[in-house]
Image: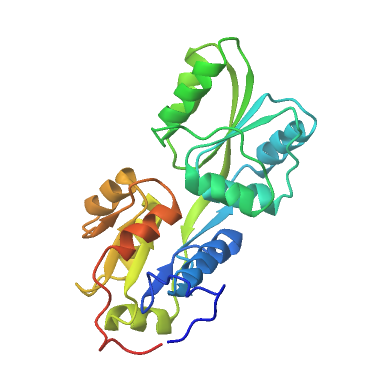
Amino acid sequence: MHVEPGHPEPQKPLRGWRVLVPRGGPWGDQVAALLRSHGATPVIAPLVNFAPTTDVADLEGALAELAAGAFDWITLTSATTVDVLYAYRAEIPARTRVAAVGETTAAALTAVGYRVDLVPDEDDSAAGLAEQILAIEPEPTRVLALRSEVAKPVLTRMLVEAGHDVRSVVAYRTVGVPVTERIAADVASGRINAVLVTSGSVAEQVSEQFPDLPASTLIAAIGPRTARDARKLGLTVDVVAAETTISSLLDAIARQPAPASGAPAS
């Protein structure tokens, strides 16, 4: 193949891969674009979504306080929490610092135009996030901790025990989203070569909705914690990202043998 000078052939390490992206919205679009740039065919099939909290007044009150500058920090422990912020068009004042539990959450924030001031260096968990905040905030601060209905308030407990004033608010309930019959058929037939598992809730839906997942379908977990959650649900995790980022996850998939050329064409 002839390549014109100054126009090198772009590397496409995932050419031939059809990859299921388990979340929609700006995050899903961003991941799909990254997959395309790597030569893959993304299949966006949201497996989880958020439902309103049962205490909407508490959430709306907290977001009004946030916009008024009442908090020194806001902590977000999942990409879905970002979806809630975006849905409410929540305003984060310049004085309020934004802490994200990991790169997935941080990427979700930047995808919708929010800034990120802190991501844990190593431990991408609620405890790791709390430890990082405590390391740089020796004096008591006001913190808004947004979480899901089922999340354990680990971060809140650690910050409160250290003397910080934390308002812990349930931002959403996670609900499963049934895939279409076509997506289910594509997964069952092996037409989908890889499934991205980006959270424990996504792992639950993969386990429930794709009970007959072909052995040839790669299960790719975004980090060790998500991989553990997936394995507890009986999923065979083939790939775990070295870093908790989508880029790292795609790099890990690219190191696997390419799908068989006899797979159904896209």
Asked if residue 52 is positioned above or below residue 115 in the image, the reply reads below
> Which of 111 and 144 lies nearest the eye of the viewer?
111
Please indicate whether residue 252 sits to the left or right of residue 74 in the image: left
> Residue lying furthest right in this view?
68
Q: Is residue 140 visible?
A: yes
Asked if residue 88 is positioned above or below residue 157 in the image, the reply reads below
Quadrant in the picture for residue 117 = top right
Looking at the rendering, in which quadrant would you find the N terminus? bottom left
> Residue lying furthest front in this view?
5
* Residue drawn at the location 44% of the way across and 39% of the way down: 151
Q: Is residue 53 visible?
A: no
Please indicate whether residue 214 sits to the left or right of residue 175 in the image: left
Q: How is the image coloured?
A: rainbow
- At which x and y percent is residue 187? 33, 77
- At which x and y percent is residue 149? 49, 42
Quadrant in the picture for residue 115 = top right
Looking at the rendering, in which quadrant would you find the C terminus? bottom left
> Which of 239 and 89 lies nearest the eye of the viewer?
239
- At which x and y percent is residue 10? 48, 72
- At which x and y percent is residue 160? 52, 17
Asked if residue 41 is positioned above or below residue 160 in the image, the reply reads below
> Which of 246 and 5 lies nearest the eye of the viewer?
5
* Residue drawn at the location 68% of the way across and 54% of the way down: 87
Quadrant in the picture for residue 118 = top right
Asked if residue 43 is positioned above or below residue 34 in the image, the reply reads below
Please indicate whether residue 198 sits to the left or right of residue 73 in the image: left
